Image (cartoon, rainbow, N blue to C red):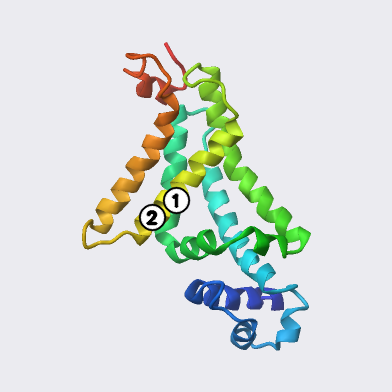
Amino acid sequence: MKKTRAEKVLDAAREIFLTKGYHGTAMDAIAARAGYSKRTIYLDYDNKDALFISVGVEGLEILVERLRKAHQAEAGIEEVINGLLEVVFEFSHQNSDYLRVFFAETSPDIVANCPESIRSRLAGLERSILGMVAGQVERAIEMNVIAPTDPWEAAGIFIGAVLGIILLSMAGSQTVYSSQTLDSMARKAAWLIWRGMYADQPQGTMNGLSSQLQTGSLN
């Protein structure tokens, strides 16, 4: 199927943004790569910010679709979390430039400068990701595994920390640790954060808790 003008512009923007980042990209360069005048680009995209976030939304849509396929609502809590984490880590390996650019350079001002339609798409995708984790926090609360807390706040803390760990591991010095070791450290840190929510359990309660969570019920 022949690509539309907007799709061609988005392809050009993606290539340049992922290479040069937000601040290193000019609309003139995107126009030249797409083969259109800058004025023509503005027929489909209001500004540079709208193009930047549109590329980001495109990547998030891919991530959310993969997360949904991995999300098994009836599986054990840690099994679900493990499946979601594996998708995120795999995505980070396959799209390291995407994570580096969009998670590091996106700011509230850039998002605010986008049309409502783009902001709405972005918010919906973010809610989808948060909701998958928040649902598992709710299950853990119902099972009395963790003390009552706001599931959405807990999900935000967990996801934010995991993404931060991934970005740090991607930027880590391989003169000290190999890339494989950095990856392993990031995975362990993610689980430490998740299981840290069980820290208020009495001594001894943690014994066997992980295996019980795998089944989704406590004895």
Residue 1 visible here: no
Q: Is residue 205 left or right of residue 51?
A: left
10 Å crowding of disc 2: few (<14), some (14-19), many (20+): some
Please report the residue visible at 48 percent of the width from the left and 21 percent of the height from the top: 146
What secondary structure is marked by label 2?
Answer: helix
Gap in angstroms between the C-alphas marked 1 and 2: 6 Å
Whether 153 is drawn above or below 204: the answer is: below
Residue lying farthest to the left in this orientation: 176
CB-based contact (under 8 Å), mark 1 and mark 2? yes
Looking at the image, which residue is at 45% across and 55% down?
A: 91
In this picture, is 200 found above or below 35? Answer: above
Determine which of the numbered discs, if any, sits on residue 164 in the image.
1
Residue position for label 2: 168
Q: Is residue 188 visible?
A: yes
- Reply above or below: 151 against 102: above
Q: Amino acid at mark 2?
A: Leu
Quadrant the N terminus occupies: bottom right
Q: Position of residue 151 (x, y in %)?
A: 58, 31
In the depicted view, which residue is nearer to us: 24 or 74?
24
How many residues crowd around disc 1 within 10 Å: few (fewer than 14), some, or many (20 or more)? some
Q: Amino acid at mark 1?
A: Gly
Instruction: Work out whether residue 161 or residue 7 is closer to the camera in this orientation and state it.
Output: 161
Residue 33 position, x and y percent, is 59, 85
The residue furthest front is 109
Image quadrant in which you'd find residue 119: bottom right
What residue lies at 60% left-to-right and 55% top-to-bottom? 61
Quarter of the picture containing the C terminus is: top left
SS assignment at label 1: helix
Residue 173 lies left or right of residue 191; in this view the side is left
Residue farthest to the top, as pictured: 219
